[in-house]
Amino acid sequence: MTSPSSARIHAQQLSLMLVTDSLACGERSLPEVVAAAVAGGVTCVQLREKLASGYVFLDKARALRQLLKPLGIPLIINDRIDIALAAQADGVHVGQTDMPVADARRILPPTMLLGWSVETPAQVEAANDLDVDYLGVSPVFATPTKTDTAPPWGLEGLSRARRLTVKPLVAIGGISTDNIGALRSAGADGCAVVRAICSAPDPQIAATKLRRAFDQGVI
Amino acid sequence: MTSPSSARIHAQQLSLMLVTDSLACGERSLPEVVAAAVAGGVTCVQLREKLASGYVFLDKARALRQLLKPLGIPLIINDRIDIALAAQADGVHVGQTDMPVADARRILPPTMLLGWSVETPAQVEAANDLDVDYLGVSPVFATPTKTDTAPPWGLEGLSRARRLTVKPLVAIGGISTDNIGALRSAGADGCAVVRAICSAPDPQIAATKLRRAFDQGVI
C-alpha cells in the first residue's frame, strides 16, 4: 500500500510550514501571527495546541480554517484527528507518541492528508509501506521548543533519509535563515518552523526571509 | 432533533458507570481493576485519561475493549473521539471544556453513543434539542477527583434536572455507598464513580456494594 500523496498535497505546498505555538505569539493573537506569516510566504500551517482543551482547540482550528481556506493554504492539525474532522481541516500530523499512523489513516477520510514525524531511518523505511503523505524529519537540529525529542538528524541524517524514500520530507527543529538553505540542498522538500516565526518581532518579515533562503538553497 | 437514545444504550446499562483513573489504581493494572469492577456489578465503563499520550490512550482503550466486548459491557471514551473511533468503542463522553456536543455528534457514526456533562439546568434544557444519549449530572456532590468543577447539584438539583428532561441522567461526583441510594430515589438512572472503585482495596467488593445500594434506592 503506497501513498497517493500527490492527490492530497503537493510537495511545493510543504516548502515552508508554520507550526503554531500560541504562547510564543505573546500578546499577538494566533490568527494575526498566522496571517502575517502567510503574507510573508508560509505555504501551509500546522496548528499545534498541546495544552488547550478540546473546546479551545476546535475554536482556534475554525478560526484558522476561515482565514486560510480562501487563501488556498492547507491547514493541518497536530495530533487530534477529531479536531481536524470537526474543523474540516486538510489533514493531521501525528508524532511518535500520538496515535499510530496506520490507525490514524483508517479513521481519516481518504481526502485528508496525514503527516508523520520520523526520528530514525527505520521509521523512514517503514513509512514507505504506509499511506502517509509526508514525513517530518524530527528534530533535524537541536531545538529548545521540544525537550522530549530524539537525537537530531543533522544534515547527513537528512541526506540519508532522502535516499530511503521518495515521500516528501519536511525538516523540523532548530531551523533559522542561517541553516534553512542547507536543508533544501540536503534533500528537504520543505521546512517547518515554530519560534523562528511565532517569536519573531515581525512574523511576516521572518517568513519572507525564511522562504527566500529556502527557495535559494545553498548559493 | 431528539435523541434515539434507546437505540444506542439502555438506561439500565448506565446503572453503575466506572470512570477510570489509572493513577488511583495504584500498582494494579487498569484492566485488572476494570475486570474486578465488572465482576462486582459495574454496567458500563468510561475510560478517562487526561494525561496520557494518544499512543498510550489508544493502547488502553483497545485493552479494555477486548476485555469488555465479550461481556457485553459498553466502553465509553472520555473526550477523545478519535481514540473512540480507532478503538471501536461504543461511544464518547464530552464535558463542558471538550468539543461541543453538536460537533461531536456530527463526526460520530450514527451507531456510537454520546454522553454530555451538564453543570446547570439551562444545559439540561439545551440537551433536549441535542442528539445526546445521556447526561452526566456533574458534580452531584463535592469531589476531590476534579478540582475545576462547577458548584454541586445536590439531591434537589438532581430532582430538578429530572423534571427538565426524559434523557437518562447519570450522577457523578462524591458518590459512595452512603449516598448512592438517595441519588436513585432523586431520579438518577445511573451513577458514575471514580475513586469509590479505583481506589478501593477490593474493587469487586466496592462495586458489589455500590450496585446493591443503587438498585435498592433509599429503603
Image: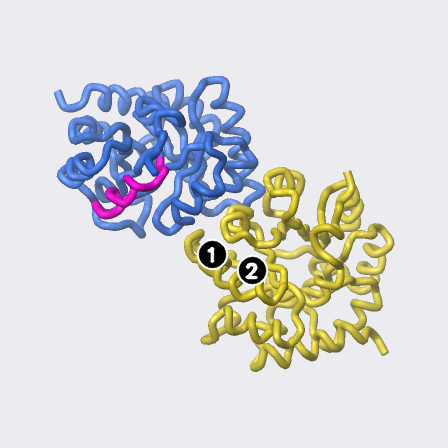
Chain colours: A yellow, B blue
* Residue B71 appears left or right of A7: left
Say yes or no: labels 2 and 1 on the same chain. Answer: yes
Q: Is residue B28 visible?
A: no
Q: Chain of mark 1?
A: A
Return the x and y of residue A35 as percentages of the image width and height: 56, 72
Comes first in the chain, label 2 or label 1? 2
Q: CA distance from mark 2 to mark 1?
A: 9 Å
Residue identified by numbered label 2:
A47
> Which element is circle 2 on?
strand
Above or below, A172 relative to A129: below
* Residue A193 appears left or right of B136: right
Residue lying at 64% horizontally and 78% vertically, measured from the top left: A206
Residue lying at 51% horizontally and 34% vertically, measured from the top left: B61
Magenta residues?
A: B118-132
Viewer-side residue, B177 vs B85: B85
| Residue A104: mark in rendering | none
Q: Is residue A20 visible?
A: yes
* Residue A162 appears left or right of A13: right
Above or below, B151 relative to B154: below
Residue identified by numbered label 1:
A57
Q: Quadrant of the C terminus of chain B?
A: top left
Pointer 2 with pointer 1, Cβ within 8 A: yes
Viewer-side residue, B176 vs A128: A128
